[in-house]
Structure formats: C-alpha cells, structure tokens
C-alpha cells in the first residue's frame, strides 16, 4: 500500500514489495491487511481418534481435575488395547488443555502490587554458570547476591561463594553504604542463612513460617530494619529481585561480549566490573530513586565486620573444626584455643593476636584442608601411622611426590618405603617444596633410584650459592701519592 501511494502503478508496487501482481490486486480490492484476511480454521485436518471416548475423558477430568493427559492416555490404553498409538498423545493433551480452559477449576491469580517508595529492599542469590567467568584462566564458580529496591528497581550485585549468613551481611552492607539510606523492611526468601528449618512435627503449628536465626536478627537490629520473608514456595512475592536475577545477568553477558574477554586477574577485578555495570543500569532510575531516598532513613551506623569470630580448641590431630569442615594448624598449638575469624571466602586463625593460619574457606560439609607441613614432624617419628592416616592423600602436595612415592614402594614396600618418602616430604617442609619437586621430576624422568639421601644431596647442590672467581685486587700506592699531589696543588 505504501509503494502504491508512491508510484500509483500496481505492477511496480507489487514488484518492490516482492509480491505477485495478482496477490497485490487481491489485497487492494479487499482493502485489508493479509493478517486480517486470514480466517480461523473451523474444520479438522484428520479424524479425531478420541471422538468416541470424549464423554469418558470429560468424566475422568470432572472427577479428578488434576489428572494429566498422559495418565488419561494410559487409562484409555488399558480399556481399549491396541486402539491408540503413542503419537496420538499430543492430540489428547490439546483436548485436555481446551477442557481445562473452558470447564476446569479456577487458577490462582497473581495479584499485582503497588510498591511504596523506600518501604522495602529485596535480596536473592543467583548462580552465574552461564556467564563463564574465569580468574587467571580458571573457571570461577560463584553466585551473585542481588539487592533491589522494588519501587525504583535500583539494584546492587555482590560476588559471593555461597548462600551463607556472611554473604548476606557482606551484600546487604555493600548495598546500604552505596545508597547511604535504609528502608523499613528487608525481604528474603526462606534461605537457611536467614531462617531456621522447622521440624516436620512443628511446621503446621508454626503456620509454615520459618523463624529468623539470631545472627540475621542481630544484623537487622544493627541497621534498624524489620525482617520479613516470602511464604514458603511463593517465590513470586520476591518477584522484583527474581526478575532482576535474569535481567542483570543478561546485562553482564552483553558487557562481557563488548569487553571481548571473560577472564579477570582477580575476584576484586570481576567485582569492580560488576559494580560498573550496576552503576550504568542505575543511571536511568534517577527520578524514582530520588523518591526512594527521600522516603528512607539516613544510614547513621558503622559498617559491621564482615566476619564472625569463634573460639576453637585445636584437637590432638592438629586440626580445628570450622563450620563442619576441618583445617590443620601448626602442631605446637595442639590443646590451645584459637580465635578464628570466619569470612565469606576465607578463614583466619589467631593465637593471642598472632596470625597462625589464613586460607580459603572450604565449601560444603565434612571437607578438609590439611597442610603436610603441620604434621610431617610427627609422621617422620611415627611412620607406621602413614599407611592408614585419615588425611593420607593430603600428604602428596603434587604429582612428582605421588610418582616418587609409587617408585619408592615398588622397591621398598611397607614401613621402609613409607619412611623413605616421609623423609623426602620432611625435606620439602624444611626447605622449598618446588626445589624438591624439581629434583624428584629429574630423577624419575632419568629413571634413577629415588631416595631421601639422593634427593637431599641434589637439592643442596642445586641451592648452594656459587661464588664467582675474582682476581685479587692489586693495590698501587703510587696512584694515591699522585692523588695527594693533585689535592695539594
């Protein structure tokens, strides 16, 4: 029609529209768009295989409206063996869908809510596997904790390693101090970081609501916020932050495509990238965000430390138990009480203020991190315990050590082989692990016998500093006399 108004010639307009002239004349004559000429089909293209059983199907649905079409198909197959084929299931599913829309029970309606400025803040975690972010070439498995103001859709995202109380504290504080204001409510789902699980026998009496734990309530009191959760299984009550999870990850995906690389030199660099993308997303929310800020209370409290501290006694195994995971510490601390700071991503153990251990925090339950340097001194004295040591695999700090152990026990099985390997591990703990690993690799590649004496001799030879040969300095006193004469003149 547009081309026709320009040219006035049907053939030219049809050609420019990639259309046959007869088709063009048909549309001109009708004066309607192609979509308006399309009439709904009122006939069937094939015979309905369930026509004779229509009353039975509807009777089943009226009696049990939640029956699935596949279940009804199986019932009909038992009643009429050989009559129906698997490919006809889709036809029955359409029948059931139409019946439910016309005669089925009412469905639950999601009631759209009008948000009030500055009233609440929603928090939720989301996985980031689809982004494929790497740190120095290694895949970085982590979560993002999104904090959203529903009225303005202002958001802030924090990189986290788990859905823990430490992660909630870290994420909430970053968002609040970015805003400088505090809303009335803080809303989460029923995560175990913020709430307690209800025993099955008490769930009904509690009305299905899970109570908040002490750490979360203390966090809310500090910032003067009222905690609230969604109903169990009602994630749409956190709809704004749930929608943000997908939208913000798509925004990050586009930013990564523009950047041209998904690799970052550190977690801090990735967090800075996320912050920059979040700021750009918030730039268009100025007017509604201003209303939020006006309605919120000024943030006038200090930031809480991003760790919890526990006093833990070192066991006779030279380990401490932190959040159901085991960590080794120097054996001289056995029986002592350590002050352990538990961060979201690491732990720090101190004895009378002096740092004794700082390492990455383990994820999951019943995991362990054992440093062979903490126990090797005792193992050399008691080599018989190595064979059945609970953390035996942690005594192989690298592939060269595992290969060396296999080579040693192949010629000296049993206690003698274990003692020989433990002496090598003792050497690595008292010198440099990398130097011992280099020597082991050379011996194994050259197919030479591996022994603690041979390894120690090579390590000492490799690490012995070489003194350069220098000619003795010849002193010519006449040069000093000449210098004195020049100074005198």
Image (cartoon, grey):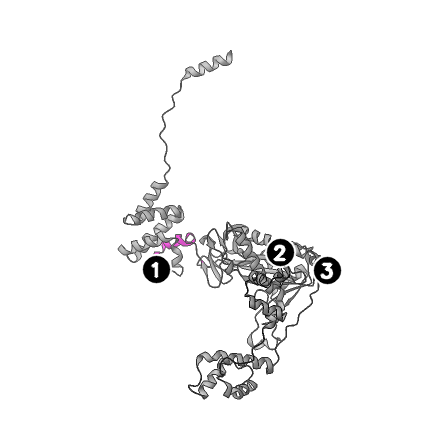
User: Which of label 2 and label 3 is nearer to you?
Assistant: 2
Q: If you read the primary sequence from the N terminus, does the residue marked by circle 1 or circle 2 appear first?
A: 2
Q: Are marks 1 and 2 in contact (CB under 8 Å)?
A: no
Disc 2: which residue: 281
Q: If you read the primary sequence from the N terminus, does the residue marked by circle 3 or circle 1 appear first?
A: 3
- Please name the predominant secondary structure of the magenta segment in the image: helix
Q: x%, y% of residue 395?
A: 39, 55
The disc at residue 387 is 1
What quarter of the picture does the N terminus occupy?
bottom right
Q: Nearer the viewer, residue 451 or 399?
A: 399
Secondary structure type for disc 2:
helix
Secondary structure type for disc 3:
helix
What separation in Å lies between label 2 and label 3 (alpha carbons)? 22 Å
Badge 1 crowding class, 10 Å Cα cut-off, few under 14, some 14 to 19, many 20 or more, is few
- Name which residue lies at 35% across and 54% down: 402
- Name which residue lies at 58% across and 67% down: 24
The answer to whether 304 appears left or right of 264 in the picture is: right
Q: x%, y% of residue 174?
A: 62, 55
Secondary structure type for disc 1:
loop
Badge 3 crowding class, 10 Å Cα cut-off, few under 14, some 14 to 19, many 20 or more, is some
- Name which residue lies at 38% across and 48% down: 428
Q: x%, y% of residue 430?
A: 40, 47
Q: If you read the primary sequence from the N terminus, does the residue marked by circle 2 or circle 3 appear first?
A: 2
Q: Is residue 58 above or below residue 482?
A: below
- Name which residue lies at 39% across and 47% down: 434
Disc 3: which residue: 295
Magenta extent: 369-388
């Amino acid at each position: 029609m547009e081309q026709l108004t320009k040219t006035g010639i049907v053939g030219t307009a049809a050609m420019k529209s990639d259309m046959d002239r007869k088709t063009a004349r048909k549309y001109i004559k009708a004066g309607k768009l192609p979509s308006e000429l399309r009439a709904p089909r009122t006939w069937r293209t094939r015979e309905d295989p369930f026509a004779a059983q229509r009353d039975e199907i509807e009777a089943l649905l009226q009696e049990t409206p939640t029956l699935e079409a596949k279940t009804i198909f199986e019932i009909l197959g038992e009643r009429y063996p050989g009559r129906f084929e698997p490919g006809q299931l889709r036809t029955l599913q359409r029948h059931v869908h139409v019946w439910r829309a016309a005669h089925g029970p009412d469905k639950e309606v999601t009631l759209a809510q009008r948000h009030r400025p500055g009233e609440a803040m929603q928090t939720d975690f989301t996985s980031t596997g689809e982004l494929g972010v790497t740190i120095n070439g290694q895949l970085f498995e982590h979560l993002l904790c999104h904090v959203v103001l529903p009225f303005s859709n202002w958001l802030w995202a924090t990189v986290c390693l788990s859905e823990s109380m430490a992660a909630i504290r870290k994420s909430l504080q970053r968002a609040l101090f970015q805003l400088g204001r505090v809303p009335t409510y803080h809303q989460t789902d029923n995560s175990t970081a913020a709430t307690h699980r209800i025993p099955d026998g008490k769930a009904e009496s509690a009305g299905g609501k899970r109570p908040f734990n002490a750490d979360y309530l203390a966090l809310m009191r500090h910032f003067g916020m009222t905690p609230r959760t969604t109903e169990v299984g009602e994630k749409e009550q956190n709809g704004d932050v749930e929608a943000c999870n997908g939208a913000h990850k798509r925004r990050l995906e586009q930013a990564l495509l523009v950047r041209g690389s998904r690799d970052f030199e550190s977690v801090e660099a990735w967090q800075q990238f996320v912050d920059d993308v979040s700021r750009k997303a918030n730039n268009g929310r100025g007017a509604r965000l201003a209303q939020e800020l006006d309605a919120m209370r000024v943030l006038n409290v200090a930031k809480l430390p991003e760790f919890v501290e526990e006093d833990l006694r070192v066991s006779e195994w030279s380990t401490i138990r932190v959040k159901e995971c085991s960590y080794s510490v120097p054996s001289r601390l056995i029986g002592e009480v350590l002050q352990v700071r538990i961060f979201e991503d690491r732990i720090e153990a101190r004895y009378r203020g002096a740092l004794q251990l700082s390492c990455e925090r383990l994820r999951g339950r019943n995991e362990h991190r054992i440093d062979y340097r903490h126990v090797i001194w005792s193992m050399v004295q008691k080599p018989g315990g190595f064979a059945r040591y609970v953390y035996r695999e942690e005594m192989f700090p690298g592939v060269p050590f595992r290969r060396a152990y296999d080579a040693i026990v192949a010629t000296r099985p049993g206690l003698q082989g274990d003692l020989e390997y433990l002496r090598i591990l003792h050497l690595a703990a008292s010198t440099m692990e990398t130097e011992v690993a280099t020597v082991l690799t050379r011996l194994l590649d050259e197919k030479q016998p591996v022994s603690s004496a041979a390894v120690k001799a090579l390590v000492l030879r490799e690490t012995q500093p070489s003194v350069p040969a220098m000619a003795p300095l010849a002193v010519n006193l006449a040069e000093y006399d000449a210098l004195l004469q020049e100074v005198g003149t």
